Amino acid sequence: MKRVNSIRAVLWAVTVLLSATGALAQCLWPPSYYKCPVAEAPGRPRPEGVVVRVQPRYSVTQEAAGRPTWLLRDDRDGSDDYNTRRIRVAYARQLSEDWLAFGQVRRDWGMDEFKLHDLYATYAGWDFADVTVGQMITPFDRVFPTSDVKLPLAERAVPVRLLVPGRDIGLLLHERDCAHGFGWYAGAFLGDGPNELRAGGGLMTTARAEWLVTDDLGFGLFWANNEDVNVSLYQKFLKKNGKAYAYQDLYDTRSVDEQTWGVDALYRQGRTTAYAGYLRKSLDADGGDDIHADGWYIHVAHPLRCCGEGKLELVAGYEEFDANDTVTDQLDARFTTVGLNYHIKGCAQQVRLNYIARDEKRDDVSNNTWLIEYDYLFK
C-alpha cells in the first residue's frame, strides 16, 4: 500500500508542478460514431476543466431462481428498481504543448464513497511516441477504452466486460500516424487487476495496433499477458457465480497466468455504424488444467429521420460468450439487445431504452431485462 501511495504522490506532483498552457499535437482518430467522439484512450484530447457524468437507470428483470450474474445489478434478484449506475467526476488540463494531465473519481452502484478511477499524465514531446504514466485503461478492444455514453448500447459487450485486463498502474507508449491511418500502443503495468491499486502482482504487458483503412472502416488487433494474477474481471465473474473451475485457490496464491488476445472492427455505411469484435482468454496455472474462454459481438446503430434530424437512433446487438470451452454450462450464453436512443443533446444528454434477452445454453432461466437510462454530462 505504501508503494501505491508513493506512485499517487509522484503523479499528482507532476500535474501540479507543470503549469503552462497549450494543446497536445493530436489527430482526431478513429472517426466519430455518429455525433460522439469514439476515442477515450490515454493521451487523447479532452475538454479542459471538470466534467461530471451521471447515469441513473431503472431496470426490470424477470424473476428466476438460480440466474447467473454478469457483474451487473440488473442481473440480480431484487434489482427491479432505480439505481444510480454511475457518477464520475473528471478533471483534465493541457499543461503545455506537450503535456496533458487527467484524473477521475467514481461512485458506481453499490459503492458508499468516491474512489480513484484514473490518474495519469501524458507527454507528447518525442517524435517516436507519446508516453503516458499513471492509473489508466489498458489499451485493448476498441469499445473498452471508449466512454459508454459514446457507444450504441447501454452496456459494453459481455465478452469485453469480462475478458479485458481492466485498469492498472503503469507506463504506456503510443503513437498514431494520421496520414496513413496507423496507430499502436505498448505498455507495462503492475498487473493487480481492475482498479485494485495493490502492489505485489506479476507484471502485465499489453499491446494494440490499429489501422484505419478508410474514413469508414477500421481494424484493431490486441494482446495482453498478465502473470501471477490475483484479481481480474474474469476471476471476479467466476467467483460471483460460484464456478471458479477449481481455479479460485490458484488465484488466491497468485499461481495463474492470463493471456488474452483479440480483433475488432469499426464500419460505417451511410448513416449506419457497426462495431464487432472477438476476444479469447487462456489461463495457465501451476497445478491446474488450462482453461480457455472466448466470445464475440456485433453492435449496430442507425439514426432515424423522424423526431428531429438524428435525435432518435435505433440500436441492436448480438453477443456470445463461453466462460470455459471444455464444458457446457449456464455461463455459456447468447445475448440479444434491441433498443432506442434519444439524443437530447448529442451524447452529453440522452435517454436509452434497451431490451436484453439472455439465453443460457444449459439450465436456461428467464432473466431478460428492460432498462431505461438517462445519461447526462456537464461541465
Image (cartoon, grey):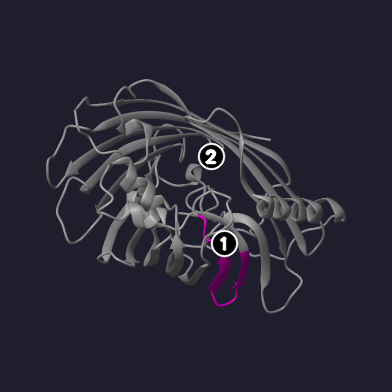
| Residue occupying image coordinates x 82% and y 59% | 96
**Magenta residue check for 54:** no
The residue tagged 1 is: 190
Query: Is 88 displayed left or right of 154 in the figure?
Result: right
* Magenta span of residues: 171-192
The residue tagged 2 is: 346
Residue in the foreground of this view, choosing between 318 and 226: 226
Residue 295, quarter of the rendered image: bottom left
Q: Mark yes or no: residue 168 visible.
A: yes
- Which kind of residue does numbered mark 2 sit on? Gly
The image shows residue 124, relative to residue 91, as above or below, that is: below
| Residue occupying image coordinates x 62% and y 72% | 175
The image shows residue 77, relative to residue 90, as above or below, that is: above
Of the 4 image quadrants, the one containing the C terminus is top right
Residue in the foreground of this view, choosing between 56 and 151: 56
Percent coordinates x, y for residue 69 in the rendering: 30, 38
Crowding around mark 2 (Cα neighbors within 10 Å: few <14, some 14 to 19, many 20+) is: some
| Residue occupying image coordinates x 17% and y 44% | 360
- Which kind of residue does numbered mark 1 sit on? Leu
